[in-house]
Amino acid sequence: MTDDLVAYLLDDLSPERRAEVDAKLETDVVWRWELDRLRECMAASGDIEQCVETSAAVPDALESSHVDLEPPVDLVKKTCCFVEDSASGKFKVEKKRCKKKAAFSAATCESGGRSWSLADVTVGAGVLLILAALIMPAVQRSRDAARNSYCMNNMRATYLSTEKYGDRYANAMPVLASNDPAAMFYIELVDAGFLAPADAIQVMTCPNSPQAQRRFQQQGPISIPNREELASLSAADILAAISALNISYALPLGYRDGNGDYRQTKLNSDLDAPLIADAPAVTARGVQPVNHGCRQNVLTKSGSVDVLAASVLGCNDKSLQELHLNDRGDLSAGCSETDVVLAPATFSSDGQLSLSPPRTMQGSYWIIPIGPAVLDKD
């Protein structure tokens, strides 16, 4: 390079070689720097050989003064920023710190940061509300379906225990006295050994019923009393013991024959007849479905579970009234063998157990008959 530049200054190059040196000087800053040095050296001393020797000594001096240095830590980032500026037409090197682009961030460098605006937040909240409106009904339907399936399984488990009881006692169902509350149906199955107490506690409550909510809030273990223990209790303690069981199903009462004697139906009679159903709410106007909205699960004597779709006003639903009231419209024992009545746990064949001033008293239970005189009250 130095020889070519000296010949260039002395105009001792062929036209072709001189054109090549001119092109080199236009593109290479090192060649231009060396040309300026040689021109100054020759103007000052006029000794060409001395200028050439000085040029050869410069690399050696630079080499001897070279010190190994570590590259800057942020060299890569600065290089990336320089390349970005060059690509965008900015050839001026600016001092700035580039940051790694984060998810959901509008800024890559400090100079280009942007925060969320009110419109962004509003749109995001609207999208979340729409998703919630679409998802929540589906979640609710899925939960109701799961609880309904659990309720049906409870009924089928009760039927299996009742069937075993009937196999042992000539197709008889759990025997209830005329003044026994319907809850004795489960207690009799447990006492006879056809239903374990732990299993009885599970199958007596529909997960979609108010009793399930009370059981969730109830503290301490649940104990199922036997017939002898109930007989020794006062009326208040009997009601408390039955309420603590959280029975959410309506259970079969017996019927009274032509002579007024109380009898129990057989398990194998009329297999389409109802055996267990969701317990309704008893009001002055009649009975209302509770556990599954306007629907009631009904277990028949054949072991199948049917769904009774009651009207919104259960007191006006004939099928619902026939399920829980006898032919006279009372929530008490049936009027004949085919008059099946399913009653809540605190009802007996003579009416509802109560601590209020009684109309009649049988055994250790206070009885208030539920009949037309009561149902007609507003």
Image (cartoon, rainbow, N blue to C red):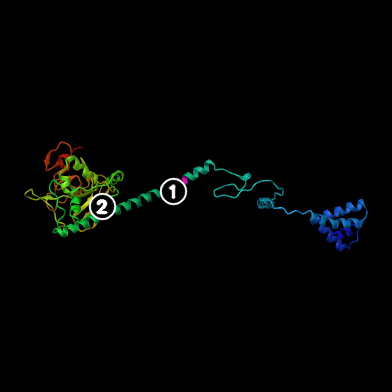
Residue at the location (52% across, 42% down)? 119
Q: Position of residue 159 (x, y in %)?
A: 22, 56
Q: Nearer the viewer, mark 2 or mark 1?
A: 2
| Between discs 2 and 1, the one toward the N terminus | 1
- Residue to which mark 1 is pinned: 131
Calculate the distance from the C-alpha at mark 2 to the C-alpha at mark 1.
42 Å
Task: Decide if residue 90 is on the left or right side of residue 135.
Answer: right
Which residue corresponds to the image point at 26% horizontal and 54% vertical from the top-left?
154
Residue 42 visible in this rendered orientation of the protein: yes
Magenta residues (range): 126-131
Q: Which residue is mark 2?
A: 198
The residue located at (38%, 50%) in the rendering is 139
Q: Quadrant of residue 194?
A: bottom left
Percent position of residue 299, x then y: 22, 54
Work out whether residue 315 can be spotted: no
- Residue type at mark 2: give it: Ala
Q: Residue furthest right?
A: 46
Residue 128 painted magenta: yes
Say few, some or many: other residues with alpha carbon within 10 Å of mark 1 (under 14 / 14 to 19 / 20 or more). Answer: few
Which quadrant, please, contains the C terminus? top left
Residue at image x 86%, y 53%? 37
